[in-house]
Image: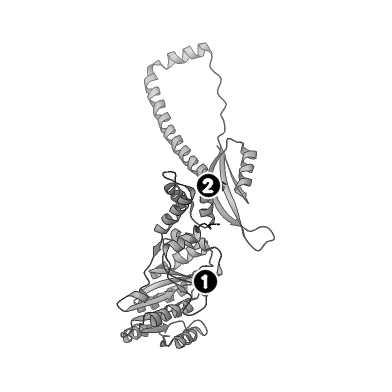
Amino acid sequence: MKVKTYNTCSLHEGLEDIKRDLGSEALILSTRSVSVRPRFSLFKKPAWEITAALEEKVEPKPEPSLGAKRQLRISSSTSAAVATARARTARDSRMEELIAEISDLKKSLRSLTKAIPGKSDFGDGMFAALVSQGIDHDIADHLIATASRGNPAPSEQRSFVRRLLADQLNIAAPVELYAKTPVVSAFVGPTGVGKTTTIAKIAGHAAIRMKKKVALISTDTARIGGHEQLARLGGLLGIPTYTCADVSTLKDLVAGLDDCDLILIDTSGSSPSDLSRLSRLEPVTAAADGKVHLVISATTRSDDITKIVSRFQRFSPASVIFTKIDETDSKGALTGDLLRNELPVSYLTNGQRVPEDLVIPATDELAGFVVPLETIII
């Protein structure tokens, strides 16, 4: 079998290349979207990697002469039964392998066909729309197959895909606002994602709207002005703020605030690649002895989000908070990241205003980032 991989700017271009090189009988083994950096360019562009194969034909061997055939039958007469049994077993085994290979090839070919948007067929266009918004191929295929049962109208299928997508998303309860018992929460994440501002937003909602007694603690002594920023925001909201430079005293400080309904703890930002800083952060969250939120900017690339989730898993975060959703036009990728990494989400932030720009997400809203409601033209 001749196998070849193509890197192209579009699926149509890739199919033409495959047809030209391998012919119309070539089979598609796999497709995946990739990002490439063109020569002399600073930015990556979307592209496709397609692997195709062509089964090379084997020339048949010439038939033996009549005399040779008779001699062959005579010399093998004593072992004919054994040879036949062995040949049948080999054919059965090879046949099972071929059936499995054909099944995989059909699945890959179906995925490639669906990835090319169609003008009238719901499945083709919707598959391409989901994949372009960051939804994995297998999830997109499952959503469309389920929504297409019974052959409903395209508008009904679209709504069904949105509902199915919403059902797979997980919203973590915003306990900081609605819990009836005291809550201690710590916030971790990379530098520059907006942890301190997010904490202030949650604190403002809890204190002003829910009438809770709130306290803020900053352990961010690594960043210049880190604890001053939280203190300034706390002052504007009328919420007391404490600085704890010594991790050994954090547990006592939390215990001393036992009359508070809510204690929010800010931590130093850490690059997911800085394993030593992540290690130094672990005693902080352990001393806080509360739930942990992982804060990530919605402008972060999907590959980097996966890396962040993996590296910060050591803190056992109860949920993720996506900030800066107002700064990206690719909100569908955010939903795809939640599904891909199996993350529950508790809050979104969509601006710099404190405490206004805080959103408690709904699954239908997140699904709408990927499958927006169709505009009705009157």
Tell me the number on the disc at residue 124: 2
Image location of residue 151, percent across then percent down: 44, 44
Tell me the number on the disc at residue 12: none
Residue at image location 61% in from the left, 50% down from the top: 10
The quadrant of the picture occupied by the N terminus is top right
Kind of element beneath mark 2? helix
Image location of residue 269, percent across then percent down: 48, 76
Crowd band around label 1 with a 10 angstrom C-alpha radius: few (<14), some (14–19), many (20+): some
Outermost residue toward the right?
A: 40
Could you tell me if residue 79 is visible in this image?
Answer: no
**Residue 320 versus residue 262 in the image, above or below:** above
**Residue 23 versus residue 295 in the image, above or below:** above
Residue 21 is left or right of residue 28, and the answer is right
Q: Is residue 57 or residue 66 the one in the foreground?
A: 57
Query: Which quadrant of the view contains residue 51?
Result: top right
Q: Earlier in the sequence, mark 1 or mark 2?
A: 2
For the residues labelled 1 and 2, the Cα–Cα distance comes to 32 Å
Kind of element beneath mark 1? loop
Q: Is residue 318 or residue 63 the one in the foreground?
A: 318
Residue 312 is left or right of residue 114, and the answer is left
Image location of residue 170, percent across then percent down: 39, 62
Crowd band around label 2 with a 10 angstrom C-alpha radius: few (<14), some (14–19), many (20+): many
Q: Is residue 364 or residue 85 the one in the foreground?
A: 364
Image location of residue 366, percent across then percent down: 46, 63
Task: Nearest to the eye among marks 1 and 2: give it.
Answer: 2
The quadrant of the picture occupied by the C terminus is bottom right
**Residue 316 versus residue 136 in the image, above or below:** below
Residue tagged by mark 1?
A: 324
* Residue type marked 2: Asp
* Residue type marked 1: Lys
